[in-house]
Amino acid sequence: MTEHRSPDAHFRTSLLEENDGPGANPTDNRTMGEIIAARFSRRGFLKGSLAVSAIAATVSPLALITADNARAAEGSAFAFDELEAGIDDKHHVAPGYDADVLLRWGDPLFADSPEFDPTKQSAEAQARQFGYNNDYVGYIPIDGSAEHGLLVVNHEYTNPHLMFPGLVTIVDGKAKQAPLSKEQVDVEMTAHGGTIVEIRKVSGKWQVVRDGKLNRRITSNTEIALSGPVAGHDRVKTSADPSGTKVIGTVNNCAGGVTPWGTYVMAEENIHGYFSGELPQGKEAANYKRLGIPEGAYEWAAHYDRFDIGKEPNEPNRFGWIVEVDVQDPTSVPRKRTAMGRFKHEGAESIVAKDGRVVFYLGDDERFDYVYKFVTTGKFNPDDRAANMDLLDDGTLHVAKFADDGSVEWLPIVFGQGPLTAENGFASQADVLIETRRAADLLGATKMDRPEDIQPNAANGKVYVMLTNNSKRKADQVDAANPRAENAFGHIIEIVEDGGDFAATNGKWEVLLKCGDPSVAAVGATFSTATTANGWFGMPDNCAVDSAGRLWVATDGQGPKATGRTDGLWAVDTEGPARATSKLFFRVPIGAEMCGPLFAPDDQTAFVAVQHPGDGGEDWEAFGRPSYYEDLSTRWPDFKPDMPVRPAVVAITRQGGGKIAV
Ligand code: FEO
Ligand code: CA
Ligand code: CA
Ligand code: CA
């Protein structure tokens, strides 16, 4: 019998979101930390000496800081009264705004959907209801409207200890979780994937159109086609699919994107957790090791052979891709676009380059892994939607190499070029794409501090890269001039591509922000001095730009111990004297991370996704014990004793209407 990991108290956030598995990058390529250190050692010195002489010659340090504050506050692109940071069991938004719960886990999506009943969960019901742990949120207008459209939402993963009654017992103050039944596994599988649902704004408030004709659930049981260079390759054939073109399901859809032609793209991130079992000798060993497969965090392999690599050794090669969904046809078969590479895909935000090619920025969320971009071969045709439908099957994937001098080179990942040859075990582009990480290792890409969402900004031509943290970066991997031997709080990189061309293969980069508490000198955070005690944050993750090109950053991993505040949504200035000023706009209840965010095309709504609320409570003074179905640190958003905590999408609007933060 196949061995499965003991499910005792394996609360999945810690297993899957730490991204500290055996997939860790084994190469000697330089880390981002080493390169930042090299840059700051020079610049920091220069800036420091100039500042000291200026202060000595003219005014007191205090007067200088006050003047800086005034300039930064005046120059801010955001007008709203900042919210106070803190921790409790509710969500909070800046004064003058409403934050209304729009869609909760279990909410009906179709005319025939059953109402949510946590004591009568079934796969059949869940497949007709909103899924769990909402992450990416996208909006596709209907008839060009900013008040009527399709909301597309990823459901990244499941937390059984919060979802199902009767699973957890407390032994010596610690939570122990019983194995799941097959029925519970089936609910988990249908709670994953994505939701496409029609929404409409009526009298200033958003409503779900329950019987919208394009409403759809995508789950871990939906048939999905493999397309692009890997389709039909021997390494993706299984006993159920000898053609190597038909996959059942998608998992761990983290961030994502909406393409310029209005399709929905879902990124498959932590795929390693779903596979269990022992790989037959010699086959795919190095490939799977580089991704940490199998991790066995889920119990799916006990009931479905395709998740047991002893029985289906090729199945993991069918996961870790970008999935594209044609939302205009609810019967369409989604496609895993293999040309975009296989790794722990975080997101897939895109932009049309000057010449009409389409550029996707892609993060691989693991400590010491890479930043990628994919450039289509074909050009976007704004007048013919059908002509764009297979653009993602043909293009060039690149990986970023950041240099000390502030330049970045995008290295093409192409079979036959450089080291990507038979000598290194690649026989085709399909091999290169299946083992994207190993190909990028060989090219000498820069090891990053966990790349999350990456956002190109049409308004100013810049690209923002969220690097969430990397506490494993050792002292000998950073320069003494950079005090952050462990990057516990993450940072944000800003890229400007050469000639303002997003398809360029070279560009320049800057650190926009090193995150963390700026009042603690040892943290080395670089928020502007106008940033208040509420305004700083750590662990940037998902992000968005609104139509004015302003940056909004959502966080994952703050909390009582990490930062003394919950996760939330921060407005971050990027231009002028206010650059690197941050202000808190929204915060989540205890245990949650902040996902989404997304601005409606008229900037009058910010959609945010509250993911895994109530997941944790031991570290919070007001609770101080494990949080699980029967004893939750929050019962957000319903606060009813018979209703568990529920991840949900929240729509933020300005009281009385109007654009947000102007
Ligand atoms: Fe699913 Fe990297 O956050
Ligand atoms: Ca994320
Ligand atoms: Ca985003
Ligand atoms: Ca994350």
Image (cartoon, rainbow, N blue to C red):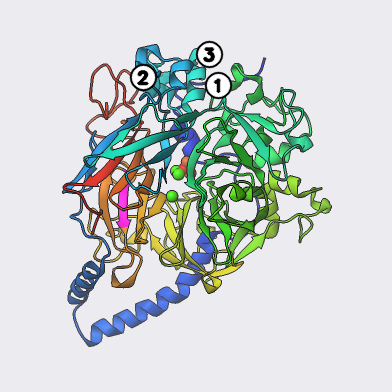
Which is more toward the observer, 518 or 190? 190
Q: Specify the quadrant that holds the C terminus.
A: bottom left
Horizontal placement of 159 versus 652: left or right? Answer: right
Q: Specify the quadrant that holds the N terminus.
A: top right
Q: Regarding mark 2 in the picture, which secondary structure is present there?
A: loop
Q: Which residues are magenta?
A: 567-571
Cβ of mark 2 under 8 Å from ligand 4: the answer is: no
For badge 1, the amino acid type reads Glu
Sequence-earlier tag: 2 or 3: 2
Crowd class of label 2 (few under 14; some 14 to 19; many from 20; radius 10 Å): few
Q: Say which quarter of the image contains residue 213.
A: top left
Which is more toward the observer, 396 or 377? 377
**Labelled disc at residue 109:** none
What residue is disc 3 on? 182
Q: Position of residue 186 (x, y in %)?
A: 51, 18
Sequence-earlier tag: 1 or 3: 3
Q: At 46% across and 49% down in the image, what residue appears?
A: 471
User: Which mark is in front, 1 or 2?
Assistant: 1
Give the CA separation, mark 2 to mark 3. 28 Å
Q: Position of residue 455 (x, y in %)?
A: 46, 56
Give the CA separation, mark 1 to mark 3. 9 Å
- Answer above or below: position of 629 versus 95: above
Q: Regarding mark 3 in the picture, which secondary structure is present there?
A: helix
Give the CA separation, mark 1 to mark 2. 25 Å
Residue 59 on the magenta span: no
Q: At 48% across and 47% down in the image, what residue appears?
A: 258
Q: Position of residue 118 (x, y in %)?
A: 35, 16
**Labelled disc at residue 299:** 1
Q: Say which quarter of the image contains residue 640.
A: top left
